[in-house]
């Protein structure tokens, strides 16, 4: 299984969520037309990422007005696809020929779920000299933010203040959709307050300062931006789900 698809599985397995078999999802097989091309234009971001004690790996993020796709690169058979309009996350696993479907959660009680620990954040900042590799000629200043949870070290990030509005909006939407799902069967894990705060109860807190070009946590997660390209027209197939795969609905 490729590295990027483990992200969803790690979040879910850590909280004891169980998937059940459902229907088979088929893609729209129509080819791109000239009129459609702009629908599939957007940004491509490449990251280096480390999750826990796993080896460093590359992650590609493709963002359009309608979708956010994450995979390990052009040859990756596994990927995560977020439909920004329907607010649905699809986690596609080629080896299992399966698609995990994480639908939008509108349960008011779940949305109001509170953590069994205090959620007091303290943010410290200082100017950073980190540079963002991008095809955008406009320079953006970077700031290092140090986030403490209940006076304890939790999360660090270096964020830029401009030029990343579209990727930032998509990332915020995805993080919120995932957090809403993780609340459904939340079970507290002792010593994981920082992890649970960042990924479940305050999923947008570290994204208020700008787009993180580098981030690292006390629970072993690290990611930094290697490169960013804008205004790319992507093939439609990158946003389609494979035909004949079984789906598991959460």
Image (spheres, rainbow, N blue to C red):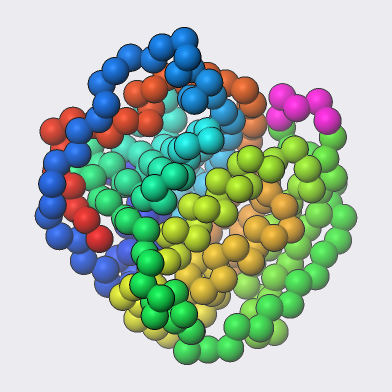
Above-or-below relation of 216 to 219: above
- Tell me residue 151's x, y (percent): 70, 84
Above-or-below relation of 125 to 5: below
Q: Which residues are magenta?
A: 134-138
Q: Residue at x 42, y 25 (%)?
A: 74
- Tell me residue 138's x, y (percent): 83, 30
Identify the image quadrant of residue 83. Answer: top left
| Magenta-colored segment: predominant secondary structure | loop
Above-or-below relation of 233 to 225: above
Q: Specify the quadrant that holds the C terminus.
A: bottom left
Quick one: which residue is furthest to the front in this view? Answer: 35
- Tell me residue 50's x, y (percent): 50, 51
Quick one: which residue is furthest to the right in this view? Answer: 127
Left or right: residue 127 versus residue 30 is right
- Tell me residue 245's x, y (percent): 16, 38
Of residues 18 and 148, the one drawn nearer to the viewer in this rendering: 18
Left or right: residue 101 versus residue 162 is left
Of residues 44 and 129, the one drawn nearer to the viewer in this rendering: 44
Q: Residue at x 37, y 58 (%)?
A: 104
Please say whether residue 205 is visible from this viewpoint. yes
Q: Specify the quadrant that holds the N terminus.
A: top left
Q: Residue at x 28, y 42 (%)?
A: 92
Above-or-below relation of 7 to 244: below
Q: Is residue 176 magenta?
A: no
Identify the image quadrant of residue 113. Answer: bottom left
Q: Residue at x 41, y 51 (%)?
A: 87
How many numbered circles are shown?
A: 0
Q: Is residue 136 magenta?
A: yes
């Amino acid at each position: 299984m490729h590295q990027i698809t483990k992200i969803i599985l790690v979040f879910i397995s850590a909280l004891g969520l169980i998937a059940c078999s459902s229907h088979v999802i088929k893609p729209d097989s129509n080819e791109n037309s000239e009129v459609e091309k702009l629908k599939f234009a957007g940004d491509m971001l490449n990251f280096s990422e480390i999750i826990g004690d796993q080896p460093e790996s590359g992650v590609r993020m493709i963002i359009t007005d309608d979708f956010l796709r994450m995979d390990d690169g052009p040859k990756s058979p596994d990927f995560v696809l977020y439909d920004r309009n329907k607010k649905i996350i699809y986690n596609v696993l080629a080896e299992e020929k399966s698609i995990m479907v994480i639908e939008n959660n509108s349960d008011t009680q779940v949305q109001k779920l509170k953590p069994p620990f205090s959620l007091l954040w303290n943010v410290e900042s200082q100017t950073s000299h980190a540079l963002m590799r991008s095809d955008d000629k406009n320079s953006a200043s970077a700031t290092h933010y140090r986030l403490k949870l209940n006076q304890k070290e939790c999360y660090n990030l270096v964020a830029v203040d401009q030029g990343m509005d579209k990727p930032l909006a998509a990332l915020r939407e995805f993080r919120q959709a995932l957090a809403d799902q993780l609340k459904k069967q939340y079970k507290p894990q002792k010593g994981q307050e920082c992890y649970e705060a960042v990924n479940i109860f305050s999923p947008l807190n570290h994204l208020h300062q700008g787009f993180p070009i580098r981030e690292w946590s006390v629970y072993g997660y690290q990611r930094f931006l290697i490169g960013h390209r804008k205004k790319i027209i992507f093939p439609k197939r990158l946003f389609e789900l494979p035909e004949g795969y079984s789906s598991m609905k959460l």
